[in-house]
Image (cartoon, helix red, strand yellow):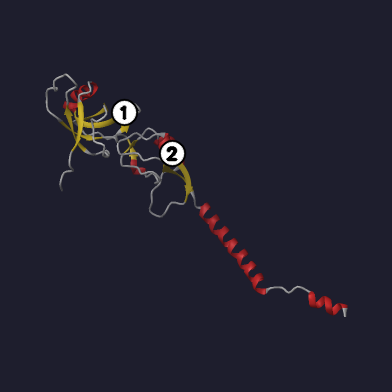
Amino acid sequence: MGDTTRAAIRPRRNVRWIAAGVMAICLGGLGAALLYANLSGAASVVVIKHTVYRDQVITADDLGITALAAPPGVETVSGDRLGDIVGKTALTDLGAGGLLSPQAFGDPVMAEGVVRVGLRLEPGRLPNSALPPGTSIQLVPVAREGAAVPGGGSVAGVTASAPVLQTDGSTLIDVTVTAAAGERVAQLAAAGQLSIIRLAPASR
């Protein structure tokens, strides 16, 4: 009688739960195998942490290193080359979060007959809208309070860097102008007698 009672209260094994446990173990093992396969094919590559516009100098803060398996057909730069890239010039716009391409950086490119001028402009002397590198602009001589308008006409140019607002309200920006106009543009900017007008894009 006692043996019969013990047999009756013996817990039954749930076959479905056992099968689910076995499947979970198998799937876990498969996931681990796939993860290992991905990691084993990963390589150290350079990524872009902060956007760098064309013709700007690349700094150490702009770049980072990550390990990944690059998609087929995508060229990357090995992480051990990071030190060689810092100080180079962006030959194209480098978008934050992307992978660095070997063709995207190098020595600065300056066309013959043009110069680059760094300007510090007072508040209100350039448009509030974005002026990304490559924007066509007109550099216009303006008069300071109580002074005459400087002689000479406006100078056509192209932005070489995005404007950077300073804590005193002024703005730093690099522009590209003809070599003949470079000295005059620099002098006007230093005297606070220069404004920037954005030109409409040339029609195709």
- Can see residue 119? no
Residue 122 rendering spot, x and y as whole percentages: 26, 27
Dot 2, crowdedness within 10 Å: few (<14), some or many (≥20)? few
- Residue 81 has which mark? 2
The tally of labels here is 2
Residue type highlighted by circle 1: Gly
Q: Is residue 57 left or right of residue 203?
A: right
Q: Toward the viewer: 17 or 64?
A: 17
Residue under the image location 75 percent in, 73 percent down: 11
Marks 2 & 1, CB-CB < 8 Å contact: no
Q: Toward the viewer: 200 or 144?
A: 144
Dot 1, crowdedness within 10 Å: few (<14), some or many (≥20)? few
Q: Secondary structure at mark 1?
A: loop
Could you tell me how far apart the alpha carbons at marks 2 and 1 are, in whole angstroms? 38 Å
- Residue 187 has which mark? none
Q: Secondary structure at mark 2?
A: helix
Lower sequence index among marks 2 and 1: 2
Residue 168 rendering spot, x and y as whole percentages: 33, 26
Q: Is residue 203 left or right of residue 87?
A: left
Q: Toward the viewer: 70 or 165?
A: 165
Which residue appears farthest toward the right when viewing the image?
A: 1
Residue type highlighted by circle 2: Arg
Q: Report the residue marked by disc 1.
A: 169
- Can see residue 27? yes
Q: Toward the viewer: 165 or 41?
A: 165
Residue 8 versus residue 38 in the image, above or below:
below
Residue under the image location 16 percent in, 44 percent down: 202
Residue 28 rendering spot, x and y as whole percentages: 59, 61
